[in-house]
Image (cartoon, rainbow, N blue to C red):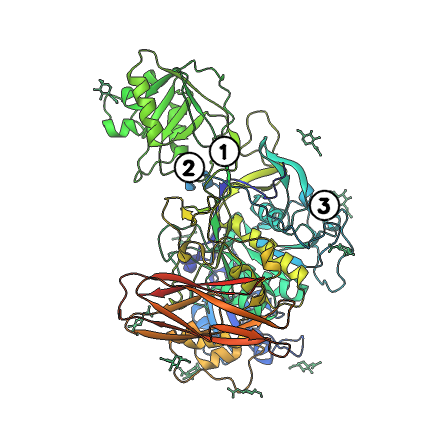
Amino acid sequence: MKDNTLLLHLFYTLLLFLGASSSSVENGSNNDPNNQNEVYIVYMGAADSSNSSLRNDHAHLLNLVLRRNEKALVRNYKHGFSGFAARLSKEEATSIAQKPGVVSVFPDPILKLYTTRSWEFLKYQSHVKIDNKPNTVSNSSSTSDVVVGILDTGIWPESASFSDEGMGPIPSRWKGTCMKAQDFNSSNCNRKLVGARYYSDPNEEDESTPRDSFGHGTHVASTAVGAAVENASFYGLGEGTAEGGSPDSRLAVYKVCSSFGCRGSAILAAFDDAISDGVDILSLSLGASPGFAPDLTTDPIAIGAFHAVERGIVVVCAAGNAGPSPNTVVNDAPWILTVAASTIDREFQSSVVLGSTKTLMGKGINFSPLSNSPRYPLIYAESAKADTADLADARQCHSDSLDANRIKGKIVVCNGNKDEAYTTADKVEIVKGAGGIGLVHITDDEGTIASNYVDFPTSLISSKDGAIVIQYINSTSNPVATVLPTVTVLEYKPAPMVPYFSSRGPSMLSSNILKPDIAAPGVNILAAWIGNSAEGAPKGRKPSPYKLESGTSMATPHVSGLASTVKTQNPTWSASAIKSAIMTTAIQNDNLKAPITTDSESVATPYDYGAGEITTSEPLQPGLVYETSTIDYLNFLCYVGLNITSVKVISRTVPDNFSCPKDSSSDLISNINYPSIAVNFTGKGIVNVSRTVTNVGEEDETIYSSIVNAPSGIKVTLTPDKLQFTKSTKKLSYQVIFSSTLISLKEDLFGSITWSNSKYTVRSPFVLTK
Ligand SMILES: *[C@@H]1O[C@H](CO)[C@@H](O)[C@H](O)[C@H]1NC(C)=O
Ligand SMILES: *[C@@H]1O[C@H](CO)[C@@H](O)[C@H](O)[C@H]1NC(C)=O
Ligand SMILES: *[C@@H]1O[C@H](CO)[C@@H](O)[C@H](O)[C@H]1NC(C)=O
Ligand SMILES: *[C@@H]1O[C@H](CO)[C@@H](O)[C@H](O)[C@H]1NC(C)=O
Ligand SMILES: *[C@@H]1O[C@H](CO)[C@@H](O)[C@H](O)[C@H]1NC(C)=O
Ligand SMILES: *[C@@H]1O[C@H](CO)[C@@H](O)[C@H](O)[C@H]1NC(C)=O
Ligand SMILES: *[C@@H]1O[C@H](CO)[C@@H](O)[C@H](O)[C@H]1NC(C)=O
Ligand SMILES: *[C@@H]1O[C@H](CO)[C@@H](O)[C@H](O)[C@H]1NC(C)=O
Ligand SMILES: *[C@@H]1O[C@H](CO)[C@@H](O)[C@H](O)[C@H]1NC(C)=O
Ligand SMILES: *[C@@H]1O[C@H](CO)[C@@H](O)[C@H](O)[C@H]1NC(C)=O
């Protein structure tokens, strides 16, 4: 059995908690009077492209700040872009914001890391296995010189996933470094782990190391580029070969998150370094909290990513874990590849055996110490109601609602309720605290994510099975049962599905850009973990080197690994060509050959999964690509209302004669040469959109024909409807004309445009918004 996916289960995405910006300097023990000033990021756009020294205006401003306070500087950005982070008074910040060459000045966002409540936070479970590795050209004996950079919590370098066995020498163009620390030295880096940097916070001395003390960074790194490790599992669960999406690629780690979270100023410093180190792909399993939508000039990820993409680096970011509500997608700038999560075809099942010898399939991870024979007393929680408690509370096992005398030594059956504040994990604590020996939780809402209840026998069952259990209890004088330890079930159908937590479109940034872009496995993904954490380990067992985790954090490195493979096979491709290849080859059907659904069983839309679920070998040879140029992105900045003065400062490649189109309006965003299409249709009746495709297939002479899948009530016409490429014609444009007698739409409508020849299929989803 070969399981190419790296799987794991706890879910958390590093959420940059951008809201609390005004308190970014902790008062704490730091008595440096300079700390009365807050850290601001001064963003100055492009770096000097001709010359490795600071731009004159940058040097001048920095001097000004340092003259006033020589300790004010926190970070200086000069490789990939210009600017700095410094302690400034509010007045200084306001004054600097007015200076020429300054795009924006904003408080350094405090970035929060959700680590401790991950199980409670993630209520769901389910699973799948995908073939994570291209089965074509890739050649296991070869080494890729593509370097994937990961901005996260650092790395556990001793993990077998980061072995460099069989890898060639480090590419000579690589300029990165392996930073030393008390627990990290240059021997921790190798031909696989070619770079490791950290960005310590002045207030957090102990975390001045690239070493990961959380696990998240190690996990995502091994998912992206981990070497093949046989017999990996989480205490036997999900057993198989753990292997990254691009096991031949190199890894560079940028530790920007610590116990207090991830600082925007550190993230920008990491982008700046990664650009000059020479990374090819950047992977960020972190982002802003959905309630806070920073604009493009004050969002550190959008800023850093812009400059990275301008240098040809593919930037892959998590869409967020704030689903299933609409408008929750983050990291949605058009230059970012935004990743939603999907399930794989693997489930972790824990069965409930009733004394009547009926076995019910439940979900969840536990290492139940109970006997396999159903001989433990079983009680329905409402029969154990405490005298003072409400019946509904008791039925749902809310705190202080149960009579411990009646529960002691029994397996307790609790009801779930969609709207309640209690999670299964909360109920485990309540039942355990009252002396119960197991929990059967009746819930249709949880289950997508396999939470780990460790040694406490816990099984999540459907309401249909719940009725059977209650009926059994009601019909028996001494009901008994047992909860079996979890087993791995493969080839689960349907899969993939979009789990509830994955953040959804449409984008808050613009309804003329479709986000998220793509979906990839992000539920119960097994991947490497730090070696010294016994969290989640069954009693008496050593820490597991591999762990199950869930979140768009886990989906993101699958796409980063895939991008690395595409880059390895097509080293000259632009970042946008690689993104296009991944998007236009995505699939929309599950393993039942039916349209992919969400875990609440509705058919998924591009707001759930973008172009669809990634495929692994098709993106290597997509036939046609949509190339999005820097000019497209600059036009985008114009269309969303940025001042031309700022736009010119931002890009290093902006031509002198560039100006914002006179008729700049958000509707023009639809014309950016993006691999998907989003159009504001309301009040229009007819909308024209243009696109240009580039032939990257091996045949020069080829004809592509079109197929349109249009929503009812909308006519979609392509002109031309055939594309004839020749040796000299590599690029061709076409127009899409959306028309309808409907002037206003009742709801957003979805469809797709597909170009194909005998060999390739190139599909773009579209949305018409109301
Ligand atoms: C910082 O100090 C202010 C004023 O003394 C106090 O209100 C605030 O709670 C403190 N913040 C932290 C994070 O300790
Ligand atoms: C780089 O720029 C600085 C300041 O703009 C200038 O003094 C210096 O001569 C330039 N160096 C090169 C090699 O162009
Ligand atoms: C595998 O790699 C070797 C060495 O780079 C190369 O000679 C060979 O052609 C490759 N095989 C395939 C199928 O790409
Ligand atoms: C680096 O760390 C390893 C393992 O901790 C140790 O064996 C080695 O001596 C260290 N090397 C240096 C140069 O400090
Ligand atoms: C993997 O596990 C199987 C069964 O547990 C065992 O037969 C095999 O030798 C193991 N392989 C390695 C490389 O450890
Ligand atoms: C138990 O059975 C009795 C009699 O059949 C019925 O009235 C009652 O509703 C049942 N209780 C439950 C919880 O199913
Ligand atoms: C653009 O910004 C500059 C400098 O801040 C300002 O002088 C100018 O009026 C702005 N232009 C527009 C069109 O807003
Ligand atoms: C800007 O200049 C370039 C070459 O100098 C030219 O190709 C391009 O058409 C010009 N663009 C505009 C908008 O004038
Ligand atoms: C869509 O277009 C209509 C009519 O042009 C306009 O009133 C509306 O604000 C637009 N909606 C969005 C989200 O841009
Ligand atoms: C849309 O494009 C078609 C074909 O290029 C053109 O004939 C038509 O005038 C355009 N319509 C609008 C509204 O721009």
Q: Residue 417: x percent and y percent?
A: 30, 36
Which tag is nearer the camera, tag 3 or tag 2?
2
Q: Residue 313: x percent and y percent?
A: 60, 65
Gap between marks 2 and 1, in whole Å? 10 Å
Residue type pointed to by label 2: Gly
Residue type pointed to by label 3: Ser
Q: Residue 110: x percent and y percent?
A: 47, 56
Residue 394 placement: quadrant = top left
User: How many badges with numbers are in the image?
Assistant: 3
Image position of 400 with respect to 252: above or below: above
Using the image, tell me which numbered label, if any, was put on residue 447. Answer: 2
The reply to whether residue 394 is visible in this rendering is: yes
The reply to whether residue 159 is visible in this rendering is: no
Mark 2 and mark 1 lie on one chain; the one further toward the N terminus is 1
Indicate the secondary structure of the residue bearing disc 1: strand
Report if the beta carbon of the residue with label 1 is closer than 8 angstroms to ligand 5. Answer: no
Using the image, tell me which numbered label, if any, was put on residue 163. Answer: 3
What residue is shown at x 77% (from left), y 48% (from top)?
A: 166
Question: Is residue 624 rendered to the left or right of residue 766?
Answer: right
Q: Quadrant of the C terminus?
A: bottom left
Using the image, tell me which numbered label, if any, was put on residue 348. Answer: 1
Question: Is residue 380 rendered to the left or right of residue 731?
Answer: left
Indicate the secondary structure of the residue bearing disc 2: loop
Contact between marks 2 and 1 (CB within 8 A): the answer is: no
What residue is shown at x 32% (from left), y 16% (from top)?
A: 406
